[in-house]
Amino acid sequence: MLRAGGGQPLVERDDIPIPPVFPAETFEGIHAIGHFYAGDPAGAREWVARHRDIGGINYMALETCFGDMTIAEALQSAELLATEVMPHFA
C-alpha cells in the first residue's frame, strides 16, 4: 500500500477507494472505467491529466506495448507519448 513519507496510506489519508486489480475481463471493460487508455494523443493527454489530478501525482509508470502489438506499433506509441503527450506536462 502506498504511504506518504512512511506514514498513513494515501488511500486512507485522501479517502481514495482502492480499485479492484482486475475491474473487468476485457480491455473494453477496463478502458470503460478509466484504468487503461488507447486512442489518439489528445485523449491520452486528457487521460494523463485526469489521473494526475485524481491522484495528485507527479510521475507515472506507463506501458506502451501490450497484447499483440508489433514492435513498430510499440515504437510509434512510445514516440507519440514522448512528442505529443508528455511535453504538455513539462
Image (tube, rainbow, N blue to C red):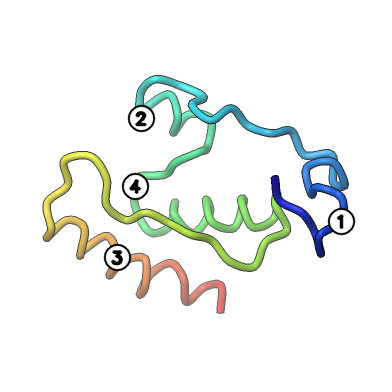
Q: Earlier in the sequence, mark 1 or mark 2?
A: 1
Residue tagged 2: 27
Residue tagged 4: 39
Identified by mark 3, the residue type is Ala
Query: Quick one: SS at disc 4?
Result: loop
At x 12%, y 60%, the residue is 72
Residue tagged 1: 7
Identified by mark 2, the residue type is Phe
Residue tagged 3: 78
What is the distance, in whole Å, between disc 4 and disc 1 at their CAs? 37 Å
- Asked if residue 14 is positioned above or below residue 76 in the image, the reply reads above
Q: Earlier in the sequence, mark 4 or mark 2?
A: 2
Identified by mark 1, the residue type is Gly
Are the residues at dot 4 and dot 2 in contact (C-beta closer than 8 Å)?
A: no
Q: Quadrant of residue 41?
A: bottom left
Are the residues at dot 4 and dot 1 in contact (C-beta closer than 8 Å)?
A: no
